[in-house]
Image: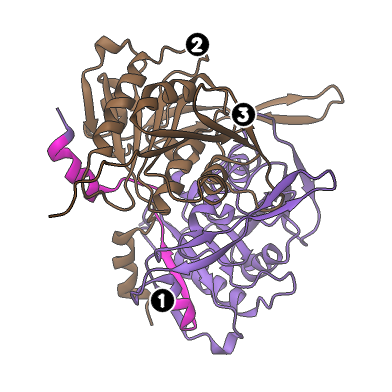
Chain colours: A purple, B brown
Amino acid sequence: MATKKKKEESIILITNDDGVTAPGIRNLVEAVKDLGRVVVVAPDKPQSGMGHAITIGSPLRMSALHIYEGVETWSTSGTPVDCVKLAVDKILHRKPDICLSGINHGANHSINVIYSGTMSAAIEASIENIPSIGFSLLDLSVEADFAGAKKYARKIVQQVLSIKKIDKHFCLNVNIPNISESLIKGIKICKQAYAKYEEDFDERRDPGGRKYYWLTGEFVNFDKSRDTDVWALKNNYVSVVPVQFDLTNYVLKQQLEKNWNH
Amino acid sequence: MATKKKKEESIILITNDDGVTAPGIRNLVEAVKDLGRVVVVAPDKPQSGMGHAITIGSPLRMSALHIYEGVETWSTSGTPVDCVKLAVDKILHRKPDICLSGINHGANHSINVIYSGTMSAAIEASIENIPSIGFSLLDLSVEADFAGAKKYARKIVQQVLSIKKIDKHFCLNVNIPNISESLIKGIKICKQAYAKYEEDFDERRDPGGRKYYWLTGEFVNFDKSRDTDVWALKNNYVSVVPVQFDLTNYVLKQQLEKNWNH
């Protein structure tokens, strides 16, 4: 009869795109600190909207910080995706059991998943066979109330850590509505809504008279179905979208195969 | 009886991630110049590996250039995705009929689609309902031979422009093998291979003794199926992968719905 071994402590890698000192990552560390050995590796400056950028034209720096009590913490000069790569290769020297990203200050539902540094870090982990979850709160403010986000982040991390046979590319995009904790109705598994930004660059002139442009835009949801993340959030649910990195459009593939292969 | 109108000239937007003066974009302009009104809007510096990054923390600049005879050309201080947004909103003041990105110097098959600025520009266009194609040649050199790439780029653009009822989010990832034109066997419609980079940061010390890290890595293909882009390229085909921006993992969604929704 085999001896029952004590379950080893899970290694929980935490990163984000708002920078290592952002309130969102502090709240995420607090929410899951006792669920395993937490290691933070995050950008030294805000990296919102960085998408899946990696740093290839310049080298990267890392610094050890002492900002979260009892938690090994590093800042890097890289993007969120760089942070995941550095963490695995240069800090942990192994794959963590789970990678968490966030809690982002602002929504990453629908099309935002594509632009989001938070979600790109999570997707990078899933490419590396590390189960991962990105968390975002629908409140851009640095004084946002993270109570609901913390509660659900903890709950979801516990649930994922307890899965016996996890999909090797398991990745979730979790968004938390900007309402008080008691009003959140629960969790809803969703698909990514088809929504986008209608761009409108704000044109200005510098003191020398030369034009420059600020990216602005209005969010428009074209997807009226009820199983989307946008619908869930509007209806006071935490939205959970399982995410993949295979971008193949199989429907279009089948159509083109009929005519194009020769 | 309706009068038969002369078909209006197609507007072809061209961008890339290697910068507006890269040989690859020059070759793409030459390849399709007579197929419509070509407008080039591309980054003023190399932006490889930028993924789907957008510029939100700083404003953008644009400059008109005169480098491609008879072709309206702009450089911007932004990422490839910014270029598409600026082109539609501030230069064309309408959607082009097609958006082409490239020809990239280096492969964008398999997982590279996620990191690629070239493909992110194409995907951005498809989000905006603009049919788009990203082209990449499997040769990093600035002295690469673009003859085969040009021939197939032209052929594919003509084929796409001739589609009567095009999918509104039509997007292709086209890679051209690094062999002489006469050896290319044709076009193969493929899926994105599951392949990734095994990272290995190159650790060095600056003159002050402080460590810094260069991202390096070895490409490893885990996908042995014969309908992947990696297989097609190895077998001397031009690989064409239809691409989508809905990242929902529907298989995992169904699994989680059973247990998680409450």
- Chain ID for label 1? A
The span picked out in magenta is: A231-259
Q: Position of residue A126 (x, y in %)?
A: 45, 49
Q: Secondary structure at mark 3?
A: strand
Residue B88 lies, in percent from the top left, at: 50, 48
Q: Amino acid at mark 1?
A: Lys
Q: How many marks?
A: 3
Residue sitting at x 68%, y 78%: A145
Q: Position of residue A132 (x, y in %)?
A: 49, 56
Q: Secondary structure at mark 1?
A: strand
Which of A52/A262 is in front? A262
Q: Badge 3: few (under 14), some or many (20 or more) residues near its Cα, within 10 Å?
A: some
The image quarter containing residue B158 is: top left
Q: Assess whether residue A22 is covered by the magenta stretch.
A: no
On the picture, is B51 further left or further right than B184? right
Identify residue type, mark 2.
Glu
Q: Which mark is residue B143?
A: 2
Mark 3 belongs to chain? B
Of tags 2 and 3, the one toward the viewer is 3
| Residue tagged 1 | A188
In what quadrant of the picture does the C terminus of chain B appear? bottom left
How far is disc 2 from disc 3 in space, using C-alphas?
23 Å
Residue sitting nearer the eye, A117 or B81: B81
Label 1 to label 2: alpha-carbon separation: 53 Å
Instruction: From this view, report whether residue B174 is shown above or below residue B2.
Output: above
Quarter of the picture holding the N terminus of chain B: bottom left
Q: Is residue B199 left or right of residue B256?
A: right
Q: CA distance from mark 1 to mark 3?
A: 50 Å
Query: Foreground residue, B229 or A70?
Result: B229
1 or 3: mark nearer the eye: 3
Q: Is A243 within the magenta?
A: yes
Disc ID at residue B65: 3
